[in-house]
Image (cartoon, rainbow, N blue to C red):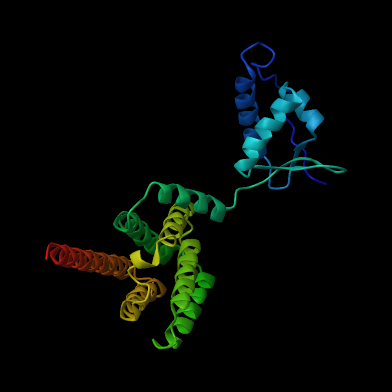
Amino acid sequence: MHPIITVTPRLLKGEDQGQGGQSAVVRAVLALREDAMQLPSGGLLGREDELVLRYGVSRPTLRQAAGLVGQEQLIQIRRGVGGGYFASRPDSSAVASLAAILLQVRRVRLDQMLHAIDPIRAELVQLAVEKASEDHLEELRAFLHADEASSEAEYRFRDFLKAEVQHNDIICRASHNQVLSLFLRILLQLVATLRRQDDVLFGRRSRIASWRIQRNRMLRAVLERDSELATLEARRCAQLMRKWIVEDQEQAQRTSDADQSTDAI
């Protein structure tokens, strides 16, 4: 049995008082969103006929509002026997992906991404030191053992990407801070959209090796529950990335100057 929400029937003023269908849709959206958030995922808000009466709106208005709230992943509509409007919950990966797309459309630069990632990572690492459970620490030990067992020659770019996802996931869960964890996931998804020629690590084995060493120092400090050292190592990770960005920018400028000189000749 799905739990059925108990609410006082409400008339959404607007449709019946001549304020226009848009006003009624907005009010229905607010009501659906509020009621869905009162229920656990899978909880039944009601059948369509019940919700039309509860909210005092027409069927088309309810369906339009449901479509908007459905885009927020707060409700699911099931048709047929046993159907109705059911509470749902947004998936954090979907939210992160959408936010990353928005930032990508706005042409956020790599240096801007890293300036946002750095303080978030440092704070998450510090929280992980303080709040990680033994299970989290065991996951971290296993990750480090597997990562350090791979030689530089065997370590491919896709291995690096997989390791980045794994260790960030462990740190996020160990921090117990859902807000910062979501922000970090958004930014990491944004970084993943970079063109390969803009990625400071793609095809750079020596840089990847240096990053692995520095990143693992940071993770070792978390294992040792050394907050000061973990924060310091996180900052060193940031410094390493910024150094490579500057190097690439300077190289690009030199290439551009050389091309202009050739054209002038």
Residue 181 to residue 102: above or below: below
User: Where in the figure is residue 55, as x and y percent of width and height?
Assistant: 71, 24
Count of number-bearing discs: 0
Residue 246 visible in the displayed image: yes
Residue 198 left/right relative to 79:
left
Nearer to us in this view, 11 or 68: 68
Nearer to us in this view, 105 or 119: 105
Residue 8 visible in the displayed image: no
User: Where in the figure is residue 143, as x and y percent of width and height?
Assistant: 48, 78
- Quarter of the image for the C terminus: give it: bottom left
Q: Quadrant of residue 35?
A: top right
Q: Quadrant of residue 81?
A: top right
User: Where in the figure is residue 73, as x and y percent of width and height?
Assistant: 63, 45
Q: Residue at x 34, y 54 (%)?
A: 116
User: Where in the figure is residue 216, as x and y percent of width and height?
Assistant: 37, 76
Nearer to us in this view, 155 or 127: 155
